[in-house]
Image (spheres, rainbow, N blue to C red):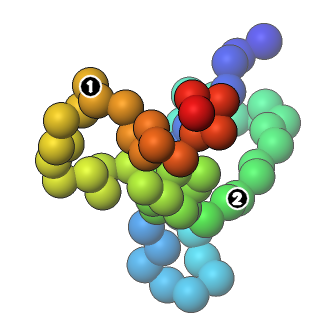
Amino acid sequence: MTPAHRVEVVLSEDGKLLLDHLPFRAGQAVEVIVLPVVPSTAAGQPLRGSVLRYDRPTEPIAEADWDALR
């Protein structure tokens, strides 16, 4: 069994997709699932890359707000 083959292409025409140079033989049955590419910021990590700098990164945050420390 040939492993899955991933190809990312940009459509040149509405509703039309052309795939070339696939690693399958003529007559071989394949399954095609087409999904839109989702930018990485919208794919479960919306804050990735948003931190510009850390001020005092090793100090506790809002330590005075914790009831257990009072």
Disc 1 marks which residue? 58
Q: Position of residue 16 (x, y in %)?
A: 60, 77
Q: Residue furthest bottom?
A: 14
Residue at the image point whose x is 45% and y is 38% from the top: 63
Looking at the image, which residue is at 56% across and 87% down? 14
38 in relation to 64, above or below: below
Q: Residue at point 30% right, 57% down?
A: 50
Name the disc covering residue 1, or none: none
Disc 1 residue type? Thr
Q: Marks 2 and 1: which is nearer the front? A: 1
Apparent side of residue 25 relative to residue 18 in the rendered image (left or right): right
Earlier sequence position, callout 2 versus callout 1? 2
In depth, the one of 24 and 17 nearer the eye is: 17
Q: Which residue is mark 2?
A: 34
Question: Left of 24 or right of it: where is 9?
Answer: left
Cα gap from disc 2 to disc 1, whole angstroms: 45 Å
Q: What SS does tag 2 mark? A: loop
The type of residue carrying mark 2 is Val
State the residue in front, 56 or 28.
Answer: 56
Q: Secondary structure at mark 1?
A: loop
Does the residue at mark 2 contact the one at mark 1 (Cβ under 8 Å)? no
Q: Quadrant of residue 2?
A: top right
Q: Point out residue 67 in the picture as x, y percentages from the top left corner.
A: 65, 39
The quadrant of the rendering that contains the C terminus is top right
